[in-house]
């Protein structure tokens, strides 16, 4: 399967921006998208990690939003988020209904792609990417828990890494 990257070189405004799940994204500058669509599906009663290059109200998300909080006694803990999701920050979304994670938005401020995106707590990091890559020392969420990543790590996804310890 051939992948095409979403490389954005808009200077101030882009009329329509369509971000596609598993397609690389890069923007060297901040800009405004007058219309934005993010094509990423989530199943009913499913959890997915997501990172977005823009701030977004949790009311625009098809599900409940959680932020990585801690790792205690081999349990990965998250805190519920209500309000604004920060750009370039990894989150967990849980949906009871399924469908697209975000429906179309207007006048969205897209942030420049940072060098790294992560949240560090205790002995772990929740790390996000906008570029297809591989990582030997990371865990991905699968139904029921985390397991070691086998294969590629795709854009708009998040992985859990441990600093010298295992889950």
Image (cartoon, rainbow, N blue to C red):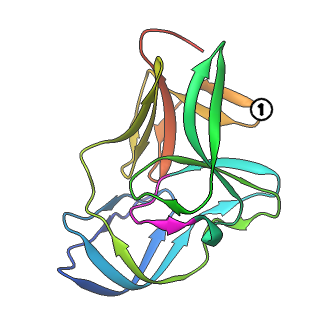
Callout 1: SS = loop
- Image quadrant assignment for residue 163: top left
- Residue located 56% across and 69% down the image: 39
Q: Is residue 15 left or right of residue 81?
A: left
The residue positioned farthest toward the top in the image shown? 165
For residue 62: magenta? Answer: no
Is disc 1 surrounded by few (<14), some (14 to 19) or many (20+) residues within 10 Å?
few
- Residue range in magenta is 51-57
Q: Is residue 115 left or right of residue 69?
A: left
- Image quadrant assignment for residue 55: bottom left
Q: Quadrant of the C terminus?
A: top right
Would you place residue 45 above or below residue 145 in this image?
below
- Residue located 25% across and 65% down the image: 27
Locate residue 153, reporting x and y percent: 47, 40
- Residue located 43% across and 57% down the image: 86
Locate residue 78, reporting x and y percent: 63, 37
Would you place residue 84 above or below residue 150 in this image?
below
Q: Main secondary structure of the magenta part?
A: loop
Q: Is residue 99 left or right of residue 124?
A: right
Locate residue 114, reporting x and y percent: 26, 51
Q: Which residue is mark 1?
A: 144
Asked whether 82 or 27 is in front, the reply is 82
Asked whether 4 or 109 is in front, the reply is 109
- Residue located 63% across and 41% down the image: 79
For residue 53: magenta? Answer: yes
Locate residue 152, reporting x and y percent: 47, 39
């Amino acid at each position: 399967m051939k992948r095409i990257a979403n490389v954005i070189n808009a200077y101030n405004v882009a009329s329509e921006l369509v971000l596609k799940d598993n397609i690389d994204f890069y923007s060297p500058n901040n800009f405004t998208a007058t219309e934005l669509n993010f094509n990423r599906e989530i199943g009913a009663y499913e959890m997915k990690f997501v990172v977005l290059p823009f701030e977004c109200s949790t009311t625009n998300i098809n599900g409940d939003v959680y932020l990585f909080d801690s790792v205690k006694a081999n349990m990965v803990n998250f805190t519920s988020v209500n309000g604004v999701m920060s750009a370039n920050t990894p989150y967990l979304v849980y949906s009871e209904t399924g469908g697209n994670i975000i429906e179309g938005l207007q006048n969205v401020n897209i942030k420049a792609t940072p060098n790294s995106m992560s949240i560090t707590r205790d002995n772990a990091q929740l790390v996000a990417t906008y570029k297809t890559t591989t990582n030997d020392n990371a865990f991905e969420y699968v139904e029921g828990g985390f397991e070691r990543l086998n294969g590629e790590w795709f854009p708009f996804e998040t992985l859990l890494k441990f600093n010298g310890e295992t889950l």
